[in-house]
Amino acid sequence: MNFKIDLKIFAFIVLYYLTKQIEVYAMIMIFCLLHEIGHLLAGLMVGMKPILIKIMPFGFSISFKDDINGWNHKILKGNLMTLKRIIVAFAGPLTNIILIFIFLNLNLPEEQKKMILFSNLIIILFNMLPIYPLDGGRIIKGILHIYCGAKKSKIYTNDISIVTAIFLTIISSIAIYFYKNIAILFIIMFLWVLVLNENRKFKINIKVYENVEKYVDICR
């Protein structure tokens, strides 16, 4: 299994240090790691093999090698592999929910409990955003794949991601104005990097689908 680190994380460390939020950032990163371990355990349980762990400014990301047998079992317009991906995506936020219940029942100072609750809620809310490739986007894409097929799931997921990013940008602009917290700006920029990168891949995939469909029509 390979490891990769996004060097922008060091800029974020400096940013959060200067804004005196380094403790919050450190705790969020610790729970992000546990979040990713949840993905890892779920992937192993459904027979997927981890191939890459990436450290990013807002957490960690794990990639799995697809189990080829999962593609051969149909589930409506999707397949078993799609269902496995949904399970793995949901396992991360579920891990944070479990951690909240565990730590809130421990004999810890109230201030520490509040920080733990805040950190895990931030991770859950961020990852469950309907933006691909965040967990929420992956879950939506998987469900749409099962009910609508691969092509439509990509189209709908891409549209949902863009609309969500625009909505969050508007809300965040208001928040930045009132709270003067530049960290919010960096989070939105990070989300747009994800959205634009996936939008570029989406356009390539759709072009491939269109070329295949043209080829099939010609063969007919």
Image: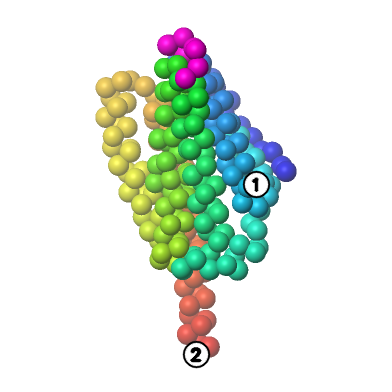
Frontmost of labels 1 and 2 is 1
Q: Secondary structure at mark 1?
A: helix
User: Does residue 24 show up?
Assistant: no
Q: Residue at x 28, y 37 (%)?
A: 170
Alpha carbon separation for disc pair 1 and 2: 43 Å
Q: Which mark is residue 219?
A: none
- Count the labels in the image: 2
The answer to whether 112 is drawn above or below residue 28 in the figure is above
Quarter that holds the N terminus: top right
Q: Which residue is mark 1?
A: 44
Q: Position of residue 178 (x, y in %)?
A: 27, 22
Residue 11 or 4: which is nearer the viewer? 4
Q: Which residues are magenta?
A: 105-112
Task: Determine if the magenta segment contains residue 182.
Answer: no
**In the image, is 143 to the left or to the right of 177?**
right
Give the crowd class for mark 2: few <14, some 14-19, many >=20 residues within 10 Å. Answer: few
> Which residue is outermost to the bottom?
220
